[in-house]
Image (cartoon, helix red, strand yellow):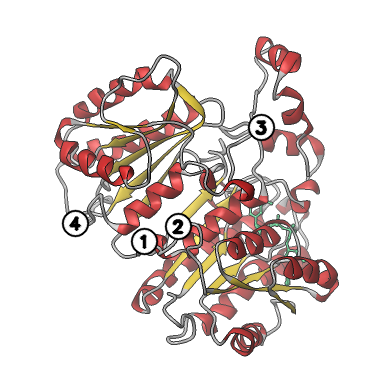
Amino acid sequence: MSDTYLQLVSGGVPATIAKKLGLPRPVRLRRTDPAAVDRPLTPGPVLVLSDEASTADADAVAEGLLGWDLDVHRALRLGDHARWGAVVVVLTGLTHPAQLAAPALALTPALKQMAAGARVVTLSRPAPPAGGAGASDPAVAAARQGVDGFLRSLAKEMRAGATANGLVLAEDVEVGAPSVRGGLRFLLSARSAFVDGQLLPVGAGGAEPADWARPLDGVVAVVTGAARGIGAATARVLARDGAHVLGVDVPAAGESLAAVMNEVRGTALQLDITAPDAAARILAAARERYGHLDVVVHNAGILRDKLLANMTADRFEGLLAVNITAPLRMNETFAAPGTLGGQGAAPRIISLASTSGIAGNRGQTNYGAAKAGIIGMTRALAAPLAAAGGTANAVAPGFIETDMTASIPPVPREISRRGSSLQQGGQPVDVAEAIAFLASPQAGGINGQVLRVCGQLMVGQ
Ligand code: NAI
């Protein structure tokens, strides 16, 4: 579905009027362009800042960025008309919140010289969980937790499609680790257009792909609900990145499914995911066609919105059956040892949650329960998948322009659309890019996490 307001205010007199009236002024986001794969990773030079204790790490990060043919600077000098494409703020050595002031204030002048679609990315260490073991010095914990509030607030101040996100490196993970470089590259790139205000924990594991443009070469992935919306976009992006795709959807959507699968040279499988033998049939189809199955994307889902006061059993139970019971049942097969992965590809299970499952949403008690359930399921799968050398993660979209959200009444739809820091809904491709990233070898250090693709939706996050 198209966003007419965004098209209207993206330039000229309407843009000026919107500015004068203090109305939202969303801009077109920097997204990947299949016709320009050799476009630079960032829309301008990259500045690497740090607190004093993190200088060595910052030097290592800058060195690594040079390997990606970027124009990297360690100080603020920039030509008169140049604009920063990204600022990476290395805070891995923070031991007291007061140390955050220097790098934050060093960022101040750079923020006035950012390119459209620029990125700020912080690298920091995790604060210890409440009552948890490990680093329990209150000042260290305050400094590390402080990065969270700093980053989320900064993201709300970014303009012109620029975003701010962070990677939170596990204690034993170096800044040059493949998982950190993979996460950094994703956050700097156009692939993360609608990811904003988020700190993503990164552990050890993962590997840099042989070819960054085709990280999924030879991987076999199944996408449920692939006939339209986010599922169809996911099939396209996975195929672009080199994967063979098996697309699943209900028989009623057979024609659109066939069209999408023809486009990506994939395989169509008409199947209702609530069928008790759904996983067995998917596995059999993948093995027959490709010899193995590596990546499962649990994307199929439905909406049955009603206030709980007016809820009916068929709406509540019917939604749970598709959105959570079916993925749970299918994972009994997919997560069993030796089922996923083959020919060098690691097992991956990626499930579609929703910001409604994190913050809750009026009229969505059924949907919120199912989508929060997806998050619980993902966390529980992390350990068994890790034991098999793989990962299980969830992607939580906010408001994405699809047929599903087109069915929301106009006023709440417009409020949801403008309620993110980027003042617009995301496109299906934005969610697809996040899914493809989590499926890739460079994301092997991210496990049991929820990656929001919501433009920092104001509700709850
Ligand atoms: P959509 O309604 O456009 O597409 C969903 C697809 O799933 C359809 O092709 C449908 O036929 C298929 N499907 C439904 N039930 C099925 C079943 N029992 N078996 C096989 N296929 C089935 O939905 P959209 O917007 O693309 O959403 C995809 C996923 O993303 C869903 O899980 C949704 O809950 C989630 N999501 C979407 C958001 C959005 O703003 N569009 C926000 C948050 C989460």
Q: Count neighbours of disc 4 (C-alpha within 10 A) and say few if under 14, some if 14 to 19, many if 20 or more.
A: few
Numbered mark located on residue 133 in the image: 4
Residue 435: percent from left, percent from top: 54, 59
Q: Quick one: label 1 or label 3, which is nearer the N terminus?
A: 1
Q: Count neighbours of disc 3 (C-alpha within 10 A) and say few if under 14, some if 14 to 19, many if 20 or more.
A: many
Q: Amino acid at mark 1?
A: Glu
SS at circle 2:
loop
> Whole-Å distance between the Cαs marked 2 and 3?
33 Å
Q: Is residue 10 above or below residue 194?
A: above
Q: Quick one: label 2 or label 4, which is nearer the N terminus?
A: 4
Q: Amino acid at mark 2?
A: Trp
Q: Count neighbours of disc 1 (C-alpha within 10 A) and say few if under 14, some if 14 to 19, many if 20 or more.
A: some
> Whole-Å distance between the Cαs marked 2 and 1?
8 Å
Q: Which residue occupies 47% across, 63% down?
A: 215
> Whole-Å distance between the Cαs marked 4 and 1?
32 Å
Q: Nearer the viewer, residue 180 or 394?
A: 180
For the residues bearing labels 2 and 4, Cβ distance under 8 angstroms: no
Which residue corresponds to mark 3? Answer: 418
